[in-house]
Amino acid sequence: MPSKTVEIDVTFNRPNDCAMMVDGKKFSLPSHEKEAEIALRREAGRFSNAIVRGGLSIPYKCFGSSVFLAQQAGFQRVGFIAEPPPKR
């Protein structure tokens, strides 16, 4: 299995919509959780590690569900990064 890392972007739209980007496709959580897991399983076949990335304003539940799905998909290592938006 390759040792490269795939990035999974997490977003949040009020009032209660978490979403993740996997391989250029956006999945709303939890409503499209099964589809997201299928896409993550494909990525886990190509990459051994995953990084879940989002801004500081993303609720932990969005990170948590994305990390959990990535773990269930079979990535060997899953981490997350919360960072401020880029400076303009």
Image (cartoon, grey):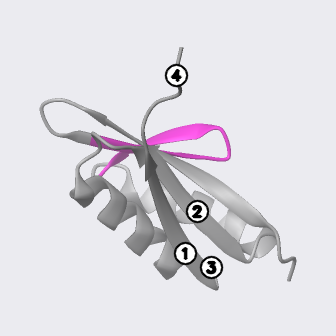
Label 2: which secondary element: strand
Whether tag 1 and tag 3 are in contact, CB under 8 A, the answer is yes
Earlier in the chain: of badge 4 and badge 2, it is 2
How far across and how far down the image is residue 58, in percent? 29, 44
* Magenta part of the chain: 18-29
Q: Which residue is mark 3?
A: 75
- Which mark is nearer the camera, 4 or 3? 4
What amino acid does circle 3 point to?
Phe
Q: CA distance from mark 4 to mark 3?
A: 32 Å
Whether tag 1 and tag 2 are in contact, CB under 8 A, the answer is yes
What amino acid does circle 1 point to?
Val
Q: CA distance from mark 4 to mark 1?
A: 27 Å
Let me know if residue 36 is in the magenta part: no
Earlier in the chain: of badge 1 and badge 2, it is 2
Q: Is residue 79 above or below residue 33?
A: below
How many marks overall? 4
Label of residue 87 in the image: 4
Q: CA distance from mark 2 to mark 3?
A: 10 Å
